[in-house]
Image: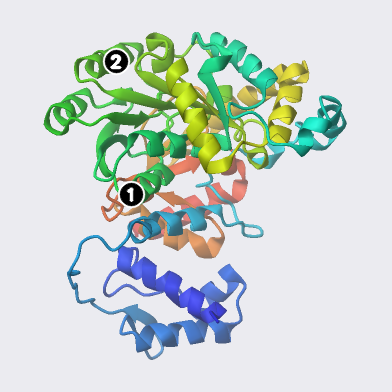
Amino acid sequence: MTTIADSLAETLARQIASGAYKAGDKLPSLRELAQLHRYAKNTVVAAFELLVSRGLVEPRRGSGYFVLPQQVVKPVEEDAGSLGRAMDIVWLMREQLKTQPDAIAVGDGFPPVEWLADVRLDKYHPKVVRTGLGALFRYGSRFGYAPLRDHLVRKLADFGIGAEPRQIVLTHGANEAMDIVIRYFVPPGGKVLVDDPGYYPLFGKLKLAGAQVLGVPRLADGPDLEALERLLVAERPRLFFTQSIAHNPTGSDISPAKAFRVLQLAQKHDLLIVENDPLADFKPTSLPRLAALDQLERTIYIGSFSKSFSAALRVGFIACGADLASDLADLKALIHVSSSEYCERTVDVILSEGHYQRHLNRLQARLGEATRNAIKLFDSVDAEVFARTPQSLYVWAALPGVADSLAFAKELLPRKIVMAPGRIFSVDSTQVSRWSRFNVGAMADPRFAKALRTTLRFFSA
């Protein structure tokens, strides 16, 4: 039976193995870990003793526990199993998804709960039931709930994307949509392009599939075109996963000129582009999207309602060519039989009400104000802001005097400030990064500004 001490020791061991703690680094104190995880001090002591017995750390009387140099042993076989290759990403996801009482999650990927509170999911249940009680006791269509797909046709038209219902497949959120695309297109050893920095759960999915993940540097106005073309010529990848608008983690938007050039390169090199747009509801519909310029010829468009309604609903979708949509719907049926028609009916009811547009207007207004305040705070401490967009849930920033954002994040943990250091979002997560992703909604808490300034003084001292 695995004890709490065993689990804590294993977590710390993985952090040491991944380079989060290097040789000579001091581990957090017994008091810090006990308070952070709400463990008894004896539990933390037991975990440290396990690490000592494994030769990972050593106690220094009166000073704490320090990481020992590790002997690097090359495995006999490089392939230790797909899940093993993805475990570093899994651990990072677990850390990001933790909720800690009174903690300020400035690295969070979701908008503040209060921004979404006016979408009262409880009040929609009677209306959902009235849309067809009998159907709620059976599996739904392999494509998903038809009325919601009709709604999505109109929603996509607002973005300039022309589609028919038969070109849309509903999924359990955008993450399942990416899973289905990866299963369909990516063989073991297949070469796939991604934004770098980019969406790190995607990196884990691709590693799990045995893909070769190749990073395309992200600039403030979109992908680095020279790097993209070099990779297309040298590696001949089949897919490029990217976020054109409200890019995670940089918050940047692709420029119209760069969007056209990306599509030209895709045409020339037979590249299929998977455009993930989870924050579409937070941005103006007029911004350039690759799927709108290309009309789903060489693009697969992925959307979601997790950020604008509720992550608990888990409703996303894929829009693509009709023949491909049919194949992906078959694959979805093979994997999951169907997506949740109850959740899909709930989203359809929400979209049918006039309240939906008012909700989006409030959401975008709040985001604009929070973005301005966040950039103002960073300017006041002389931080470098990667992209200055009028409204973005994320700001990618480098703090003055901070060469390693992971080290800075560790300093903020005892103050109950949880950051998202830049190396998390890199294809090579062992590389030191001075950048971090900041959630502008979480930054509004005045405790963050105070802790930021105090810790920056410590770093520059």
Point 51% across, 17% down: residue: 167
Please tell me whether residue 241 is drawn above or below residue 461 in the rendered image. above
Please tell me whether residue 54 is drawn above or below residue 202 in the rendered image. below
Task: Read off the residue under disc 2.
Answer: 263
Compute the Cα span from label 1 to label 2.
Answer: 26 Å
Which quadrant of the rendered structure holds the C terminus?
Answer: bottom left
SS assignment at label 1: helix
Point 40% across, 46% down: residue: 205
Q: Position of residue 440 (x, y in %)?
A: 54, 37
Q: Position of residue 198 (x, y in %)?
A: 37, 38
Q: Residue 233 lies in what quarter of the image?
A: top left
What is the count of numbered marks? Answer: 2
- Disc 2 marks a residue whose amino acid type is Leu
Residues 89 and 284: in front is 89
- Disc 1 marks a residue whose amino acid type is Lys
Please tell me whether residue 230 is drawn above or below residue 106 in the rendered image. above
Could you tell me if the residues under marks 1 and 2 are in contact, i.e. CB atoms within 8 Å? no
